[in-house]
Amino acid sequence: MKIAVLPGDGIGPEVTGAALRVLDALAIAGIEVEEGDVGATAYRRHGLPLPLDVIDMARGADAVLFGAVGDPEFDTLPRNLRPEQAILGLRRELGLFANLRPAAGWPGLEALSPLRPELAREIDLLVVRELTGDVYFGAKGERRTEAGERQGWDEMAYGEEEIRRIAHTAFRAAAGRQGHVTSVDKANVLETSRVWREVVSAVAGEYPGIAIEHMYVDNAAMQLVRSPGQFDVILTGNLFGDILSDQASACVGSIGLLPSASLGERQTAYGTFGLYEPIHGSAPDIAGTGRANPLAAILSLAMLLRHSLGRDAEAGRVEEAVGRVLASGLRGADLGGDASTEVLTAAVIRELVQPDQGAA
């Protein structure tokens, strides 16, 4: 089993390092780890945010563990050289079209949510976001209007097959959860969304045991705040999914606790090839201070073990260990506490190795 580890920028190396320490503690035989540079780190060393040898490394692995990319120093570079192009390029080159972002409240952390505790307690949803289409990958540019003003433009487009395959991902995910899919679009305004809704409705017919509901994106954003417990699986496109998944993380109370998986169609000997990353950014302002919360990266490792390496038992052990650490009252700075990256990582490892000893 081979894992390509791409730490990236800011706190990326710190949180992926924590996840690798947890992986070592699991003592799974036969796992090979190879590291590569991406983002601003890669640009400084190689002149590109996504070197070709890193793409080859990722293709040759069974899974990718990704940290974070982004550095304000390079915000003025041409778009194709900015650090963020590393993750966008990997999604495209590796055919990772389905992003799974679970959002669920942890017992005892309801007070951290901006929502009322009784609403925060209800949150247990999965955002299934299409990753390789929409305005992010559509044609774009700048032009002049007849009045001589600059005008930026971006093309939003989805083909039937792109919609069909992400819809199947969502319905299969719902079959293992509460059996309800909410497809989010803007079909009253956008032609792209009209086609989206028609194709999703057709796919829904292949899953008679799964309930389907269509919702406009503005209403979905409102309902996430008013009644988040109504959602099971949210299926949506790239742009809307980016926004709604971050909103869901805010409703839970901390972006530092949420993992994600980006999956394609390629199957390995152990499971589905995928890229796994915490959904927080590179947070350069706290890099090197020991204040980074490693739990989202550790939970991303759990998703990697489950989906790509077929190690469901070990994935469950990691998730349970994180749950016990949080239940013990240990908190990082993002959760209002003072536990460092090292303290949180050590507590998770202690729970894995000696769960009866407690996280304190």
Image (cartoon, rainbow, N blue to C red):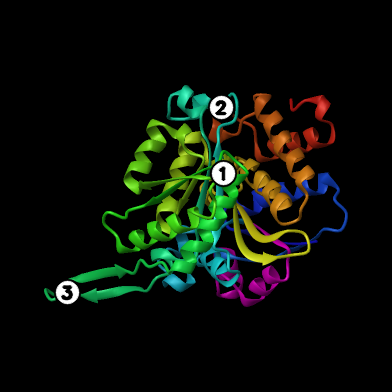
Q: Residue at x 60, y 65 (%)?
A: 38
* Nearer-the-camera pick, 282 or 214: 214
At 51% from the left edge and 29% from the top edge, which residue is drawn? 122
Amino acid carrying label 2: it is: Leu
Q: Earlier in the sequence, mark 2 or mark 3?
A: 2
Q: Is residue 236 magenta?
A: no
Tell me residue 328's x, y (percent): 68, 24
Estimate the spatial distance between the alpha carbons at disc 2 and disc 3, rounded to whole Å: 51 Å
Say which quadrant the C terminus sits in: top right
Query: Secondary structure beneath disc 2?
Result: loop
Q: Give me the disc on residue 102.
A: 1
Front of the two marks 2 and 1? 1
Q: Is residue 245 above or below residue 350?
A: below
For badge 1, the amino acid type reads: Pro
Relative vertical location of residue 212 with respect to residue 190 in this rendering, above or below? above
Amino acid type of the residue that numbered disc 3 sits on in the rendered structure: Thr
Distance from disc 3 to disc 1, alpha carbons, whole Å, reads 43 Å
Q: Which residue is mark 2?
A: 109
Helix, strand or loop for disc 1: strand
> Label 3: few (<14), some or many (≥20) within 10 Å?
few
Looking at the image, the residue that sits furthest to the right is: 29
Q: Is residue 237 visible?
A: no
In the picture, the disc for residue 145 is 3
Q: Closer to the N terminus: mark 3 or mark 1?
A: 1
Q: Which residues are magenta?
A: 40-65
- Is residue 216 something that shows in the picture? yes
Residue 299 at x, y percent in the picture: 66, 44
